[in-house]
Amino acid sequence: MFKWFMLAVYVILLIYTMAHFHKGLEFITGKKRRYLVGMCTLVGVCCLMILVGRFLPADGFRRHIIEFSNYFLGFWIYLVFFFALLDIALILRKRVWKKPAFTWHTATFGIILLLSAGLTVCGGIHARHVTVNTQNVTIHKSVDGMKEMKIVLASDWHLGYSIGVRDMKRMVKKINEQNPDLVLVAGDIYDNEYEAIHKPEEVAKVLKGIRSRYGTYGVYGNHDVSEKLVGGFTTQTDANPTRDPRIDRMMAKAGITMLQDQVISVDGKIDLVGRLDGEKTGYRNNRRESLQNLMQTVDKNKPVLVLNHEPEHLKDYKDTGVDLLMAGHTHAGQFFPLTIMRSFVWENYWGVEKLGTATGAVTSGVGVYGPPLRLLSNSEVMVLNVRFEDGR
C-alpha cells in the first residue's frame, strides 16, 4: 500500500512540475511547438529514469542510469520547492496583499532553473568533503590507568550507487589522522542492495586500513537489509526484511566487529553495548533486546557506552547507568529544504546533549541516501574526546 501511495505522490508532483515547465518554456521557446514538446519530453524522460533504472539488467549501464537519476532527483526536488514557493507568493500577492496578478516571464523561470541546478552542483560537491566534528564529553567514573579516550564515530556510509571506494578512502584517511583509541560505526553500512556496492573486496581492503588502539566496532542500521530502492528511497513494505549475509562477510574481512544486542569489554576497562536496530533488525521474527535487559549484563562501576543506529527514545537512557549513547541515522537533515524539518523530527538531530546522567552524541554521518547532496549539513567523522573523572 505504501509504495502505491508514494507512486501516486510521485505522479502528482511530476504533473505539477511539467505544468510549470510547460508554462516557463513557452517564454523561452517563443511558443514554437516542436521545441516546447522536445524540451518537455526531455525533462519527462529524466524524471522517469528514477523508475526505469529499477528494471534494467544489473550492469554498468544500469549503475550510470541510477547514479544520474539520483542527482536528477535532487534537482527535481529543488524545482518542486521553488515552484511551490512561487505559487504561494502568487496566492499571497493576489489574496492577501491585494496586488495585481504576477505574470510569468523568462527571468522567473530562468532563475528557478539556475538556482535548482546551482544547489544540486554545490550539494554534490559538498557531500564529497568529509569534515571532522570534535566534541568533548565528561564521564564521571574513574578508569584505572586511563584519564581520557579518543573515540571516532563514523556512521551512515550508505555504500552503493552513490558511495564507493574513493569515499571510503577519504573517510579512512580522516579517521587515521585523529589517532583514535576506539572507532565506532553506528549503522547503515550499505544502501539496501549489496549488488550496488562497487568492488566490495576493495572496499573491505580500504576499511581494514582503519587504525585504532582498541579496534573498530559497529552496529547495523535500518538500511542494512535487503529492500528495493527508487531514487535512493525504500519502496518495499516487508515488515521483517532480512540482511544480505555477504555484508557480514565483508565487515569481517574489513576487521570490523559487528555487535548485535551484545555487550563487550574494551580492554577490561569499559563496557560497550551494541544494539540491533529498533526498526529493522535484519532477522525474521527477531526483536531486539530491551535496554533494561542489556544493562543487566554490564558493570555499572565502569563507563558504559551504548552504540545504537537511531537516536530514538532518548528518555529511556536517562539515569539507567548508561554514560554515553552514540548514534547516527539523521544525517542532520542532509540537504536543504529537508534540514528545515530536522529539529521537529528528532529530539537531538545532531551534536552532543545531556540525557540526565548520560550524554547523547549524534553524528550527521559520512555518506548520503537518496539524492547524493549535502546542503546545510556536513559529511563528517565525529571525534569524541572522552574524559574520565571520579564523580563519587
Image (cartoon, rainbow, N blue to C red):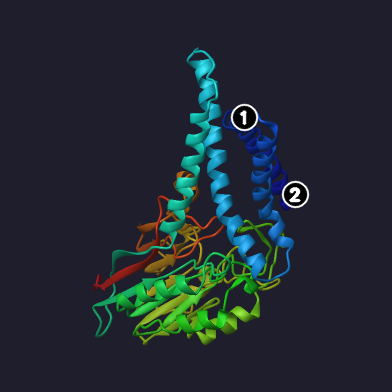
Q: Nearer the viewer, residue 78 or 28?
A: 28
Other residues around mark 2 within 10 Å, as few (<14) / some (14–19) / many (≥20): few
Residue 291 on image: x %, y %: 51, 69
Image coords of residue 304 (percent x, y): 39, 74
Dot 2 or dot 1, earlier in sequence: 2
Q: Is residue 295 left or right of residue 387?
A: right
Q: Is residue 31 left or right of residue 381?
A: right
**In the figure, 341 relative to 353: above or below?**
above
Disc ID at residue 148:
none
Quadrant of the rendering where the C terminus is positioned:
bottom left
Identify the residue position indicated by label 1 in the image: 26
- Occupied quadrant, residue 132: bottom left
* Residue located at (61% from left, 55% from top): 69
Q: Is residue 92 above or below residue 113?
A: above
Assign a secondary structure to mark 1: helix
- Name which residue lies at 40% across and 50% down: 376
Disc 2 versus disc 1: nearer the observer: 1
Q: Nearer the viewer, residue 231 or 47?
A: 47
- Across the whole image, how many numbered discs are drawn on residues? 2
Task: Characterize the local packing of mark 1: few (<14), some (14-19) or many (20 or more) Cα atoms within 10 angstroms.
Answer: some
**Cα distance between the residues tagged 2 and 1:** 33 Å
Is any atom of residue 282 visible in this view? Answer: no
Residue 376 seen in the figure: yes
Across and down, in percent, residue 213 comes to 34, 85
Identity, as a three-letter code, of the amino acid under mark 2: Trp
Q: Which residue is mark 2?
A: 4
